[in-house]
Image: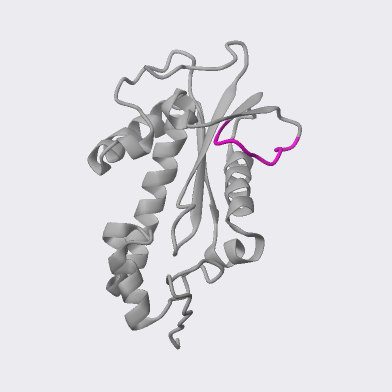
Amino acid sequence: MLLPYLNKDLMEAGCDEAGRGCLAGAVYAAAVILPPDFLCEELNDSKQLSEKQRDALRPIIEKEALAWAVGIVSPEEIDKINILNASFLAMHRALDQLPVRPQHLLIDGNRFKKYREIPHTTIIKGDGKYLAIAAASVLAKTHRDEYMLHLHEEFPLYDWNKNKGYPTKKHRDSIREFGTTPYHRMSFTLLPEDRQLSLEF
């Protein structure tokens, strides 16, 4: 059973990101403030849920949350500032959009760049420990997956509808055969042999 809060008397926002380890596409992050009496036994770390389960949970979270938002950092920005800073920036952008100002932040992971004057707590594997982080993980993952499906329509050769941009064998084989797209993260090692190819557009 996931915990409803860390600090009972504070309005907490859970934050998590999706797409950090991908070779292509933006990194997404979500910030979620849940009501103190929020109950959902099905909610868990998005990586422990099936796609069907995540898709079913998303509207529940978006409807019942006191506030939620999604932040996005593009592949070009990732290449400029690196993926760690991009993950922090995506969380900051999500927090910027919250219509309610949280009093404390629960961050999945062990590092975070301070957001304004709001105190935060980093929690390793927090998406499997706290409801608000788990909810953020589901929103970040489902919104990013939806985005990758749109990119797949534009570039179907890379199987992004299945791998969502992660470095699967099929994805890397397609990079090797067809080159890169404008959505690939050129600062990443796209191929084990580090051959960076580019298509003309």
Q: How many marks?
A: 0
Q: Quadrant of the N terminus?
A: top left
Q: Residue 58 falls in which quadrant of the image?
A: top left
Q: Which secondary structure dominates the residues rendered in magenta? A: loop
- Which stretch is magenta? 107-116
- Compared across the picture, whether 124 is left or right of 191 comes to right
Q: Residue 80 falls in which quadrant of the image?
A: bottom right
- Compared across the picture, whether 159 is left or right of 29 comes to left
Residue most toward the front? 193
- Residue 110 in magenta? yes
Q: Where does residue 167 sit, x and y in percent of width and height? A: 38, 61
Q: Quadrant of the C terminus?
A: bottom left
| Residue depicted at 41% across the width and 52% down the height | 144
| Residue depicted at 49% across the width and 50% down the height | 28
* Residue 127 in view (yes/no): yes
Q: Is 73 placed above or below 30 here?
A: below
Residue most toward the bottom? 200
| Residue depicted at 23% across the width and 40% down the height | 52
| Residue depicted at 51% across the width and 45% down the height | 29
Q: Where does residue 109 sit, x and y in percent of width and height? A: 55, 36
Q: Where does residue 61 sit, x and y in percent of width and height? A: 39, 31
- Residue 193 in magenta? no
* Residue 159 in view (yes/no): no
The colour scheme of the drawn protein is one colour
